[in-house]
Amino acid sequence: MTALSSKDRLLQRIADRSAHVGIVGIGYVGLPLAAVFGAAGLRVTGLDASAERVAAINAGRSYIDDVPTDVVAQLRADGLLDATTDFDVLSDLDAISICVPTPLRKTRDPDISAIMAVTEQIAHRLRPGQLIVLESTTYPGTTREVILPRLEASGLTVGVDYFLAFSPERVDPGRTDWTTRNTPKIMGGVTPACLETARALYETAIECVVPVSSPEVAEMVKLLENTFRAVNIGLVNEVLLMCDKLGLDVWEVIDAAATKPFGFMKFTPGPGLGGHCIPIDPLYLSWKLKMLNYTARFIDLASEVNTEMPRYWVQKVQDALNDAGRAVKGSRVLALGVAYKRDVDDVRESPALDIIHLLHEKGALVTYHDPHVPEVQVEGLRLQCEPDLDDALERADCVIIVTDHSAYDWQRVARLARRVVDTRGALRHLTDRR
């Protein structure tokens, strides 16, 4: 009888659901991915440097809004999900998805140190029949130029002994219409066999897997998606600045333009960019192109506009206080919402943090309220959510709406606040306003 190849053995284990899947990094991307693999009947082990996260998973608790605790508890009860901080488990896994953070350094160049550290851990334990899929956002070429050489040092052959692919995460926290399961998944393999095995694994848990010709294409897809959003947000933020100069209501302009049924896609202005992707991903692409002696002008300009928005809104707070005969210094300013987007608890890269920091630097007595975020740290300043929203609104000399959570009663906010700076247009449709 002919022995099965590494590829055929892996495909067989995927098909009969005996494959053991590992998720390295069980945060906003990794935990939802672990949940859908577990729901598909695959045993999943989460690996994370955070002992707190590991303990929560093993106790059947979730720490991410998009994955309910009862889902984690059921997967634990069914023996389909566990977690560990011990990387020795890597040698037992059939498939490994890498979902670690890839932030920017202070110099605004990519920090892929977490990817490299995980790759080294995998390389030391790599065995025939394993599939490695990178999901962390990065620049085109990372999978082939950074990960592949380290795995090749093991002496095993990619596409024959083990398999390597890139599949960018497309998580949008807080959404219930598009989730990890039904959002189409891009997949690019280093070899055709790599693509085949990666596609087979992900199709067990995700409704639509979209194959592309290479990891570089898949890496570029992710950067294009979020560069598209960053550039258009930059454009509409600049339109807000233009309308301010022209004395026009930017929200009326945008709403009217959005009635066009073709050739226009609605984006809205705000306090700046936040989250784990849009403020960062385009700069990965810009950095890569600079290495090739090319300037990504749209990206750089959009980044400049978006980065300056917190300062613009702080100036609006200062103007509102000046109109009332008050200085910023010593005034009580309430930031309404600190999460980077509506109805989530994620403060990563949130422009609210910049706004709070800038106001604090000017001597304002800054407090905040956010129903999703009980505590926040801003440049060493630790703040806790105001316990009584009505009282906080009445005491504030100025309220700045930073995140338009759906839990807020905007009519009540407008009635109780002395003066409001609205970065999201949350009050634009109200008829009873001060």
Image: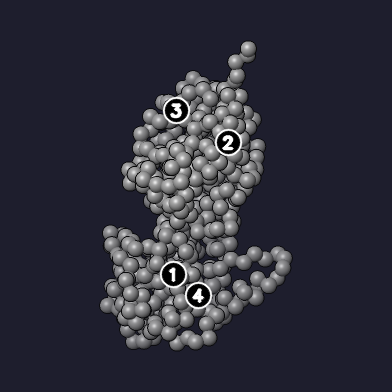
Nearer-the-camera pick, 12 or 257: 12
Mark 3–mark 2 distance (CA, rounded to whole Å): 17 Å
Q: Please, what secondary structure does the residue beneath circle 1 have?
A: loop
Looking at the rendered structure, the kind of residue marked 3 is Asp
Mark 2 and mark 1 residues within 8 Å of each other at the beta carbon: no
Q: Nearer the N terminus, badge 2 or badge 1?
A: 2
Q: In the rendering, at what x and y percent does residue 317 appear?
A: 39, 77
Location of mark 1 (residue): 402
Q: Which residue lies at the image location 48% right of the left edge and 27% below the top edge? A: 151
- Residue displayed at 33% across by 77% down: 392
Pick the residue in front: 290 or 102.
102
Give the Cα distance between marks 3 and 1. Answer: 46 Å
Q: Is residue 42 above or below residue 356?
A: above
Residue bearing the label numbered 3? 92
Front: mark 3 or 1: 3
In-image side of 425 versus 182 (left or right): left
Position in image of residue 406 (x %, y %): 49, 70
How far is mark 2 from mark 1, CA to CA? 41 Å
In the picture of the structure, the residue carrying the numbered disc 4 is 426
Identity of the amino acid at label 2? Answer: Leu
Looking at marks 4 and 1 on the same chain, the residue that comes earlier in the sequence is marked by 1
Extreme-front residue of the structure: 77
Quarter of the image that includes the C terminus: bottom left
How far is disc 4 from disc 2 in space, using C-alphas? 43 Å
Quarter of the image where the N terminus is located: top right
